[in-house]
Amino acid sequence: MAEIVRMPKMSDTMTEGVVAKWHKKVGDKVKTGDLVAEIETDKATMEFESYQEGVLLYRGVEEGKSAPVDGILAVLGKEGEDYQALLDAESAKAPEKKDEPKKDEAKKETKAPQPSQMKIVDVPKPSVKAAPTPEPAMKTASHQTDSRLKVSPLAKKLSSEKGIDLNAVQGSGENGRIVKRDIDWYKPGNVGKSSSAKAGKAEQIMLPDSFVTEESSEEVPVSQMRKTIARRLAESKFTAPHFYLTIEIDMENAISTRESINSSTGSKISYNDLVIKAAAFALRVHPKVNSSWLGDTMRINHHVHIGVAVAVEEGLLVPVVRFADSKSLTEINAEVKAFAQKAKEKKLQPADWEGNTFTISNLGMYGIEDFTAIINPPDACILAVGAIRHVPVVKEGVVVPGNTMKVTLSCDHRVVDGATGSEFLKTFKGLMENPVVMLGMGNI
């Protein structure tokens, strides 16, 4: 008997899903566990495996189109079976939809210059000593060569056609198996190379040979992730009364502590790890900052789960370092790197991004000196971290070279008052300027 396959709910915030790719055609046989489609949720693109068996009689959603959770994704049944009665019954349940307005005719577009038309211009950079900057949360991990690679037949065929070395591909399937999407998403990278030129070396800037002289635009579909980011941040910005507190931190001791740890042990930590650790300790001292507004009540969290903003191609993900105050710097480092890698490979699971009580957004690696961030619900605060700057500072009445870093705390005024946020930043500043105190509380 024919039965409906419904759009699954793949995350706690998912309301609709987009079919990114169908792996079965109408008429194909489907067994339990077969990969039927790739579905883009508000957080990631995930594989949908069938828990039903039969012949695929009907596909209810075109590739690139969306359907609400529990909407009709497909119909399975016996070959040649009539399924129209099922669709009619579903249509009778659903409220009538108004016809969508016709879209305006597309504007005339002028073709943008292609990479082959671009000129390379060397722009000399001044030969000055660069100030140390908080490192990115992760570096791309290379895939280890394995003589017994696990590869699906389709992925093997596609890699051969595209000339892709399977040893360079990170498998995202079960037990590291390389599947079709890994080949589709694979982009050769320059692993180990710096993304920016060294100080004193010319940096290449691409300039177009020609310029657009007519009005031109294009409309691109909005991903589920971008829709969710837009909705959540708009709700946060326009419902939570934000105010901002900025403080400057002397980073000399943090720099020397990090260099000492990285040179004297087998561990490698980043400035971001120190920031997470210091914030976690400060939250234990100031629990009101580690809180949420619930309308009639406030939730003061006694545990510290810090969300760490990670940029991916489609937007921003915030995986959570749980019980961050109890973890060592190396544990935090390893966890954040693993989360960042999973985020880029679209392998984060709902449990990875749920439960944050405080969030950190670090743009220091991009050279941003200071900025304000929008609070990440349900948190009451978010800490925006800027770059370490090499600047003149006054010490004991004398101007000397120094390294400072600005951080800005965005606060929900319904929960956190100015004095409370200021006390938190004072504690955070003290820990960053004397990181040995944190090392005394926990292992490196």
Image (tube, rainbow, N blue to C red):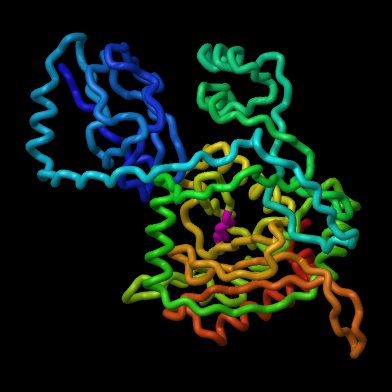
**Which quadrant is home to the N terminus?**
top left
213 or 314: nearer the eye?
A: 213
Name the spot of residue 17 as percent of width and height, x first.
Answer: 34, 40
Above or below residue 160? Residue 412 is below
Q: Residue at x 40, y 53 (%)?
A: 228
Q: Is residue 223 visible?
A: no
Quarter of the picture holding the C terminus: bottom right
Toward the viewer: 263 or 218?
218
- Quarter of the image where one finds residue 235: bottom left
What is the residue that sits farthest to the bottom in this orientation? 397
Identify which residue is drawn at 8% across, 24% down. Answer: 85
Above-or-below relation of 225 to 278:
above
Q: Quadrant of residue 223?
A: top left
Position of residue 358 in the picture relative to residue 60 (left or right) = right
What residue is at 61 percent from the left and 13 percent from the top? 160
Q: Is residue 158 above or below residue 216?
A: above
Residue at 80 percent of width and 70 percent of height:
251
**x, y (%) of residue 43?**
45, 45
Q: Position of residue 284 (x, y in %)?
A: 60, 71
In the picture as drawn, the residue positioned furthest to the top comes out as 79
422 to 179, vertically: above or below: below
Q: Please report the bounds of the magenta region as a residue range.
A: 305-309
Residue 82 visible in the picture:
yes
| Direction from residue 289 to residue 76 in the image, left or right | left
Task: Pinpoint residue 252: horizontal percent, then vertical percent.
Answer: 85, 70
Residue 125 horizontal side relative to residue 30, left or right: right
Residue 361: image quadrant is bottom right
